[in-house]
Image (cartoon, rainbow, N blue to C red):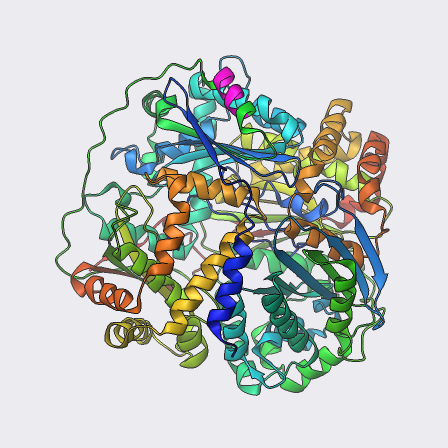
Amino acid sequence: MKHSKLNAPHPHPRPGAGLLVGSLRSIIVGRSRARFTLICLLTALASSMALAGVKIEHWIAPSGAKVYFVETRMLPILDVQLDFAAGSAFVPAAKAGLAGLTQGLLETGAGDLDEEHIAGRLVDIGARLGGGADSDRASVSVRTLSSKPEQEAALDLLRAVLSAPTFPQAVLERESARAIASIREAETRPDAIAGKRFAAAIYPGHPYGVSPTVESVGAITREDLVAFHHQHYGAKGAVVSIIGDVSRAEAEAIAQRLTEALPAGGGDLVPPAVTQPVRETIKIAHPAAQSHIHIGLPAIRRSDPDYFPLLVGNYTLGGGGFVSRLMKEVREKRGYAYSVYSYFAPRKLEGPFEIGLQTKRDQVPDALKVVDQVLTEYMAKGPTPKELAAAKKNMVDGFALRMDSNAKLLGYLSTIGFYDLPLTYLEDFPAKVKAVTADQVKAAFGRHVKADNLVTVIVAAD
Amino acid sequence: MKPLLAAVAALAFAVSPAPTLANPFETQLANGLRVIVKEDHRAPTVVHMVWYRAGSMDEKDGTSGVAHALEHLMFKGTKTLPAGEFNKRVAEAGGRDNAFTSRDYTAYFQIVPKAALPEMMQLEADRMANLKLDAKEFASEMKVVMEERRLRTDDNPHALVSEVLNSLMFQAHPYRRPIIGWMDDLEHMTWQDARDWYRQWYTPNNAYVVVVGDVDHREVFRLAQKYYGTIKKHALPERKPQNEPEQVGIRRVSVKAPAKLPYLAMAWKAPKLHDVQKDRDPYALDVLATVLDGHDASRFARNLVRGSRVAQSAGASYDATLRGEADFVLDGQPAEGKTIADLEAALRGEIKRIQDEGVSAEELTRVKTQSIAAQIYKRDSLMAQAMEIGGIEAAGQSWRDIDTLLEKIKSVTAEEVQAAARKYFTDDTLSIAVLDPQPIDQSKPKKPSGAVRH
């Protein structure tokens, strides 16, 4: 009996800023909307033990796709996700928006099914199609009941939209127009302006810094979609994640069935190299009551050995919600902001480190001063022994929380697969967290967060 | 398409292997606190929530926002626990915690490894009775709350429209006040206002505990007695009904804010759920909301966004389980090149079509399928299960009614949906709010709110 949007419990959760690496969803958050950001971003990987008896199985399908599978029979449901190196990093700036449109239009026509048939069929079987495109990857997922007729129908649809999308011209025109309207709308919103300008500023000349524009979306043709799908949605390099109420044999058949008819493209694709920006402060006028501030730089690759020191270290700086230094100094002690946080969002190449906050506009200099002091002090000295112990305790003891649903596990499977993390990654997690030292945190921050490269973007600045 | 009945039969079958029949379990302590436990042994984790039946609807004019402000202050320490220590203890237990305030209730939760449950109960019990409030912590936290208001409402055009629409459609009922509070009230709030709120409403006989996870309910009942059982109860202030007088004519309002696309929200007065067994209209309206906007094949998506392309977005919302008064809201943004008038006509056209022609058997079947699937998927999330229990209890119904609600929704007929559409969508009970987009004037900060009535 809950359809309410306008009067939902207040406050609402914050949608991700398009930076999420895993497919974790934030639960309802009240006191602070950003406090789980880091947990979502960086601890997208944890133990396999929380769902009792969880065991990850891995194989290569005959099609060449990499498969990650967890059998769990406790609920009559099945989740399947496919990930491709088909993110925005593989799109020229003049066609920015192509990765998202390609992913979005998959379900608007496939084989001899039009979009109304696909939508209607999904509703009839109670299945849900999901996914999206970020910088590195595009994902398509389905959640279905595991009972045979529903499961079969859901997998048939998933196979069709992945392998035989038709990208109807009329749908492209409609969705381009909607995307352009959204872009124009976003250009009036301080949070959206800040996010775009920040990405552009820390990734000068790099696809990680490019956002879709009215012109670039308007330039995308049906041929572009067809070509992008052909080139980037191949079985080679695809990652298939499966969790739920099916056997290993069934999972093998599912993985092959979903990938055998994919286009021939794919394989090891890597975006161009990232260069560091030069330190600067960018101010953008806007009439908002609050200024939106982002501070950061390109920081870490998913494969970097400094991952754990930065993960553990950032908990104390600005990732650990109310117990982080930024939250204590900026919000709890001074009341300068409702939301203040820091995170690392590792990608194939150097993903961003960011500190973010919003504060009433005449308070910006004071708030910035506090943020600068906190960061400088932390860079110089690292966490205290007590802080480090508390961070580890949260991550190690809180382990089970990150693995207590099929939906969360699916996100971990796909991240392990897409970023080529070792299969033992989950088992190793607690030991890796425990092994981090304060010196390692300090050294890792020194290597990845250089003051000379820090960019500050302020929207609605006086 | 495949025969639909077969699919639904299969879905119904899929639901049947549910866990223990007796689950959830409920008890009540001598001080009035109710404890509801749902055992779910899939993972060694647990959600612990405390719900207080005190939300913004219980506030008085002049202190709007105090329910939410107190929610913030509940983290500022007790007689024995220093400020900030609550979050620290939860974090060190490996958990996460937060809280949220609605019009009807205020709720606090921790998600923790199961071994930490006793400590969480001890912490929540402590702040149920022993909160320490002082002028200094209060002043600092109110700045945070005002930043929150700027973020969520003042700089958010759609939120501004919602706020103004609520205050337009409700003139006597307390739902007219925003949950976060008017800025002027926040600026003039005192720590004594917060203290009074806490003393009035934070008592075990106005609260209930919801625990979902890998627990034994008998052990949870024992722990609840140990930690919460010693708290003394006190009488609650009188709650006046404050019923809204009948609306006798359309109301319109517009809001100016920096934006590109206009936005329209139309709210009709609607019945809420009083009697789970006997009521029919709330279930019919719930089905109507799903037919209009419940899934990707619903009418708004199919007809307005994809078909006629009059809408950039369009939605329908209705919530019958609440303490106050219900409304049925249609909202959306016109597509580029279309106007608010075009969108309003299109939304009204969809209602009129149902008034004239009703809904199809296929649409009703889809509503049922969606609701069955949603119930199964919900079992993948402890938090979703705890929210479902807590939410229905807040509205004055029981968790025991959850299955009944589903059955009732499944029993709704096409005739009932059509009759409800005819009965409730009249202009006399309609309030309309429109966002009038303004170009960004970069030279000067805007005033906090630009509501204009006409």
Q: Residue at x 30, y 69 (%)?
A: B414
Instruction: Indicate whether A437 appears above or below A68.
Output: above
Q: Position of residue A328 (x, y in %)?
A: 60, 30
**Is residue A406 toward the left or the right of residue B309 in the image?**
right
What is the chief secondary structure element of the magenta stretch? helix
Judging depth in this view, the residue of B34 and B303 nearest the camera is B34
**Residue stretch rendered in magenta on the structure:** B220-227
**Is residue B198 toward the left or the right of residue B170 in the image?**
right
Among the 4 quarters of the image, the one containing residue A162:
bottom right
Instruction: Indicate whether A112 appears above or below A158.
Output: below
Please indicate, yes or no, whether residue A367 appears anywhere in the rendered image: yes
Judging depth in this view, the residue of A114 and B186 nearest the camera is A114
Judging depth in this view, the residue of A260 and A125 nearest the camera is A125
**Is residue A198 toward the left or the right of residue A136 in the image?**
left
Q: Position of residue B90 (x, y in %)?
A: 61, 28
Q: Position of residue B223 (x, y in %)?
A: 53, 20
Q: Residue at x 64, y 70 (%)?
A: A152
Q: Position of residue A137 (x, y in %)?
A: 72, 64
Please indicate, yes or no, whether residue B256 appears anywhere in the rendered image: no
Specify whether residue A1 is painted magenta: no
Specify whether residue B223 is painted magenta: yes
Q: Residue at x 29, y 34 (%)?
A: B58
Instruction: Indicate whether B339 appears above or below A271.
Output: below
